[in-house]
Image: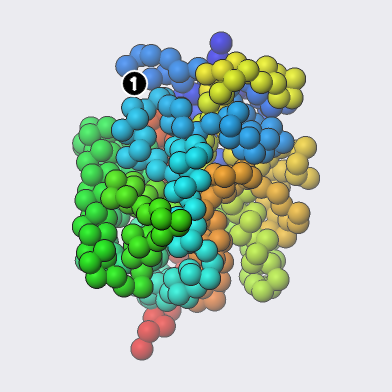
Amino acid sequence: MDTLAPSGLSVGSSDFWRRPLDERMADLSALREENGPFFPVELQGFVGDSHPFYAVVGHAELVEISRHPKVFCSGQGSIAIQDMPEQAMEFFGSLINMDDPRHARLRGIVNRSFIPKRLQDVLDSVERICSELIDEMCEKGEVDLVPALAAPFPLLVICEMMGIPRSEFGTVLESTNIILGAGDPEMLGGREPFGAIFEAGITLTGLMNELATERRKNPTDDLTSALVHANIDGEFLTPEEIGPFFILLAVAGNDTTRTATSIGMHLLGEHPDQRRLWQDDMDAVTATAVEEIVRYGSPVTFMRRTVTHRTELSGHTFEAGEKVVLFYGAANRDPAAFKDPDVFDVRRDPNPHVGFGGPGPHFCLGAHLARRELSIVFRQLFDRLRDIEPAGPPVHLEANGIPLVGGVKHLPVRFTPTAPARS
């Protein structure tokens, strides 16, 4: 049984997800009000097969599921809705497709290299990279914000963090665009989706393995060196784990900042009063504004979990093997958790959003970095291009099925041209 939204569309259809954000969220809210925190959905596969799952749209229920990975696991069949072969899961999922004890082992190694203290040098470079990109656009007066700033900014930070030279940036950007593109023809450039995605993954893995080999021989102070030489109770990352981790970092590590930058600019154009509140008091409002953009825009659409044994939650009995799909945007509009959830409020506090995932072992490893990046990008934009505003609506990815990330591929903006900051 597939529960249809008031629009007449199934949550499992591409057409549902190709609409504007507020239309999608209104449908999900109506479905929650009518059906409660769970309802059945049928995702149609690429070869005419069907993939049933339960949509999770309640905030409390999503949090509860996230806290209990032994009951709702990540390592059976993938965090994607359709099961993936084990080799593909390891290739594209790394940490997010693992359960304990392997997940705890790998995350323990990575955490040692990803704590805020070690990241300080990288965080300091975020300011410089953002400034360089604004320098390149500030004299033009009108640009597409996605290729000019939103897409390259977080990825350049990750590449510098890993020690990947700027000469390879174009390759990394093209590969991540394909993987994040969710089958969008513009991102694929005429190529077949599955073949293009695997080719992009192979490219990123090959690049990372070459760098890791070099860093084992000649360590530097970048994150790649830290990862390949990390020793936690005699445990090291294996060569087979380094490449998939880089794919995870290059894709999942930049999608929140990339999408939130574009969605945030669009939202501020729609809510000029909220923009004025933020721009008039950057020090006081930036932290809450960043959290509200992540809540309201919810860049990551979903993650799937698989039920390991019969269990009951909020009056519903789940059977072993059933799939549950956590819809973060819907949970972030749950009136049981948020006052006036459909209101965009840059001073919202408290804001217990799940835009970086629910609590538990799979909470976003890069949340600290993403918050820093979003704070800096909007602070610099408001400081240097004070009248920047959208010049048209955002153009979202044309996803096949349900996109893992609700990406924006184009957002025209205009502003009064200014001189670059560089001398």
**Is residue 275 positioned above or below 422 on the image?**
above
Whole-percent x, y for residue 164 in the image: 28, 64
Question: Which residue reaches farthest top?
Answer: 1
Where, by quadrant of the figure, is residue 378 drawn? bottom right
Please indicate whether residue 105 sits to the left or right of residue 327 in the image. left
Identify which residue is drawn at 71% across, 52% down: 351
**Is residue 15 positioned above or below 143 on the image?**
above
Whole-percent x, y for residue 260 in the image: 52, 54
Please indicate whether residue 85 sits to the left or right of residue 261 in the image. left
Quadrant where the image shows the C terminus: bottom left
Dot 1 corresponds to which residue?
46
Please indicate whether residue 284 sits to the left or right of residue 249 in the image. right
Where, by quadrant of the figure, is residue 63 drawn? top right
Compare residues 256 and 279 and report the one nearer the observer: 256
Please indicate whether residue 110 sits to the left or right of residue 325 in the image. left
Whole-percent x, y for residue 17 in the image: 49, 33
Compare residues 265 and 361 and report the one nearer the observer: 361
Whole-percent x, y for residue 120 in the image: 50, 73
Identify which residue is drawn at 31% across, 72% down: 220
